[in-house]
Amino acid sequence: MSAAEQHKRTEKILEVSNLHTRFKVRDGYLYAVNGVSFSLDKGEMLGVVGESGCGKSITMMSLIRLLPPAAEVTEGTVLLDGQDISQASSSEINAIRGAKVGMIFQDPMTSLNPFMKIGDQLIEGIRYHKKLTRVAALEKAAKYLELVGISNPDHRLTEYPHQLSGGMRQRVMIAMALIGEPDLVICDEPSTALDVTIQAQIVELVKELREKLNMSIIWITHDLSLLAGMVDRIMVMYGGQVVEEAVTDELYRAPRHPYTIGLLKSIPSLKTEAGSRLPSIGGAPPNLFAEPSGCPFAPRCSFRTDRCTREVPPLTPLQAGESDPLHRVACWVDVQQQGAAQ
Amino acid sequence: MRRYILSRLIRWIPSVFVLLLTIYALVFFGAGDPIKLIFLQAPGDVAYDPARVEAIREAAGLNRPFLVQFGDYLANVVQGDFGNSLVSGRSVNSMIQAALPVTLQIGLSAICIVSLLGIALGVIAGLNQNKLLDNVIVGFAMIIWGIPVFVSGPLIIVVLVLGFNQDVPYGWDGLFSPLVLVPLLVLGLNPMALIIRQARAGVLEVLSEDYVRTARAKGIPNLQVVLRHIMRPVLTPVVSQIGLLVIATLNNSILIEKVFGLPGLGRLTETAIKSSDYPVILAIVLIFSVVVMTSNLLVDISYPLLDPRAAAKRTENEE
Amino acid sequence: MTELAIQGPQEDRQISLVQDAFARLAANKLAVLGMILVAVLFIIAAFGPWLTPYDFLDQDLMARNQPPSWNHWFGTDDLGRDILSRVIYGARTAVVVAFSTVFFSLIIGLFIGSIGGYFGGKVDAFVVWLIDITMSVPSLLVVIVINVSLKPSMVNWMDAKFMETGNEFYRNTIWVDFILVFGSMALIKWPKAARIIRGQIMSVRNKNYVLAAEALGVSTPNIIRRYVIPNSIGPVIVYISAALGEAMVLESSFSFLGVGVRPPIPSWGNMISDGLRVWQLYPHVLAAPAAALAVVTIAFSFLGDGLNDALNPRQWK
């Protein structure tokens, strides 16, 4: 069975089609997510990469509608484990949050309530969802703390967030996301706010947990180099749209979208000559205050054509016969032909 | 914690001392001669006799040098004796004992009601930001903040009497009589605006905090998010306003007592000032200041109780 | 690799801080309303008394306690004086006292606050202690005491001066009232201004860009000029508008209690006190000054809030 057929056969935990989210601002709208579609197999780990403001976080938060009051999802369907949750009522969404979909946020310093004990914050969700007694819930919490590598869990439960280090707080956040035993876990840059050594620990921890608990995971980051050796597939976003999507190795080996190519080139490697200039992508971030017309990357793209500025390129699979049928690109230009992929 | 309270108390003492000294000096050097005043205000057939005035002054020890008189006064105060009224001769203590409970009862009740109601309204407003409910509450708060007590008081009286045919609420009948309702309401209006505003601002700030987003991500119902995650952080800034609240209430009670005829400290102050009865004035100033400083102290103590981070800092500093 | 061509983003209009604040203020309808009302107040206070048909002292004992009519738009009080004229003059009283109070509190406050902020250490500790004491005193009470205590001596002094010089100015003891009122209020209200300036100085001193400037050899007066003053202007403006409103209320509280500006000089406070005596029979006597005071304080409240929002914008409304 070919990989494509295999992919179709495998059960999907998440299927998103044509998601649009916008923010109401003073004189109009900010179009943050513009037609994002993707899917996730059960047990798969997907990396989502893009610069600040490209819409990666908002996309994922739109799935469970965890948005600020000014934001609204204007279009799109979301199938979670086969069920359409895009029109779910608020109590249905609440039942999903924490229990079927868990979230781990970026900044552990501010994401924990400084006024509540760790234990109370951990058990809040499951006491509501699973109707556990306080004692039973705390026991479970202690187990999960141990699972994420926190020593002396029973004592930690009685402490306040400010008494823990940054790395420990992030581990608590992870425990808090997992304790509800969700099917899907979304990690929104969980290691970005931590220093590098802790960052590595957290990454290792998540990899370990994925093995143990067999969860589906979405990992959001702006750091492309982090995803190698960690995720199964990578999705690249720019200007509120998906511009490229491929199996990890394939993406690093043969990127097709000019933005992806630029990103990869800007990663410093051991082979980079000392004293040479690190390539960067010129230009400025896209203006999201207008509805998208044309490819969002066009202003900064050296391959752009007339068509690129007029029509939004759809995300299309590469020609048949390529090594990875899952490799999709949203571009009008065949960069291989242009000899750009060096 | 105890050390903190102690250190604050120690800082009080010079403050209170300076305050007393200043007021004493002001009244001593500035105020008209109270004995003379009594004579001038007495019914017509009592002749103004300078010799008699002198004699009375001498007898009351009013001719001694300033510092001697002040020292004497202080010594008495420390023993709890505030002297006697220059006008009536009654002991100031007894006058205060009669008046203080009234002011205290009304003041405390007003503060309690105002805090509870104010917080509730402020939170509701904050949660419904920019919607009609919010605008109504904020508008209401702005209006009641703007109208001074001695305007809203008479206004409400006018409405009650002309509109609803009630009697003019005047006089004091104990804390639990219906007479107290209107003054309580009027006293509470002004400070409630403060609390509403602070609670609302607090809620808005908390709402944009990351940990609220985390709580929502856990899927717990909105009401629970509000009660458990939002109320606690909001309390701290609101409590910090209580000091101002107390001062405002004290000030307003002076005015209220005149409008509604309540026999409290405010009334006492008015009459004492008009007749330069300075033992009474001094005693009242002392009491008011002590009340304010106490409430400030209580507010300060409450911070570590409300905010675990402050508690940690406090113990840190004490080590 | 070929240079990536850049197409610039849309031009953002550059606006200065002042313009930005102004725009925000103008968008706030309540604040604009407040501003208009306050402007009207100032105009009435400045020019009103010359435009009234009656002098506020004129008594017409044949027309006492008249309800509003064409002759007397707001009616007359129980000495036959035209209430409209008195309310207008009351505006002047309010504005004069408020401005003087705020002016002097600013002077005292800025002076003391900057000393504390600048010198730090023991001097600052003293300043903080001074601020604390002054703020913990119930203002109404103390101002009344100051007023009442100093008044007789000042009156005596004025009389003596009049005897000495024969200068008409000293005859008019009304000035004593005014000076005492705004003087004593200034003595109570300066701490807020002091705190502002002290806070600014202290926070500026710690900022990295100031340390950098000092390291580059920028002199202290220049640091003050370039960093402290521009940063302080916002809070000071907000303070001024709030303090003006508060001063007006405070002043009317005093005259309400019979201290401070006394009849026959109209102050809305003493007019309200008068009105309270007869309102059941003649409600108009109470209504006019009460409404005036209420409207003005609400206007200042709106304006103050608007200024606060405009100058200290909050993220993500």
Image (tube, coloured by chain):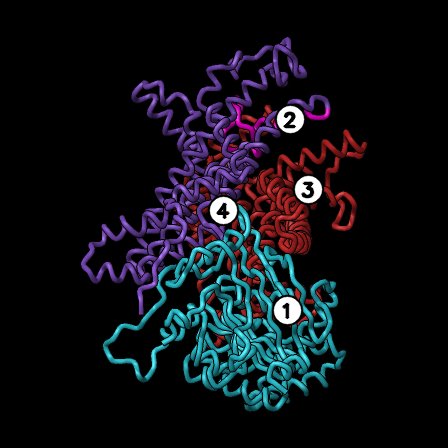
Chain colours: A cyan, B red, C purple
Q: Chain of mark 3?
A: B
Of A14 and B189, nearer the camera is A14
Left or right of residue C219: residue C25: right
The amino acid type found where label 2 is placed reads: Leu
Question: Which residue is most to the right?
Answer: B165
* Range shown magenta: C256-280
CA–CA distance between discs 3 and 1?
70 Å
The amino acid type found where label 3 is placed reads: Leu
Question: Which label sits in the foreground, 1 or 2?
Answer: 1
Q: Residues within 10 Å of mark 2 (few under 14, many from 20)?
A: many
CA–CA distance between discs 3 and 2?
21 Å
| Residue underneath mark 1 | A16
Residue at point 53%, 87% (across, down)? A205
| Residue underneath mark 2 | C286
Q: Chain of mark 2?
A: C
- Residue B262 has which mark? 3
CA–CA distance between discs 2 and 4?
35 Å
- C266 falls in the magenta region: yes
Q: Secondary structure at mark 1?
A: strand
Of A128 and B137, nearer the camera is A128
Q: Would you say the residues marked 2 and 4 are in contact, meaning their CB atoms lie under 8 Å apart?
A: no
Question: Which label sits in the foreground, 2 or 4?
Answer: 4
Q: Quadrant of residue C98 in the image?
A: top left
CA–CA distance between discs 4 and 3?
40 Å
Answer above or below: position of A144 versus B60: below
Q: Secondary structure at mark 2?
A: helix
Answer above or below: position of A224 versus A294: below
CA–CA distance between discs 4 and 1?
41 Å
Question: Which label sits in the foreground, 4 or 1?
Answer: 1
- Residue C309 has which mark? 4
Left or right of residue C205: residue B63: right
Residue A103 at x, y percent in the picture: 60, 74
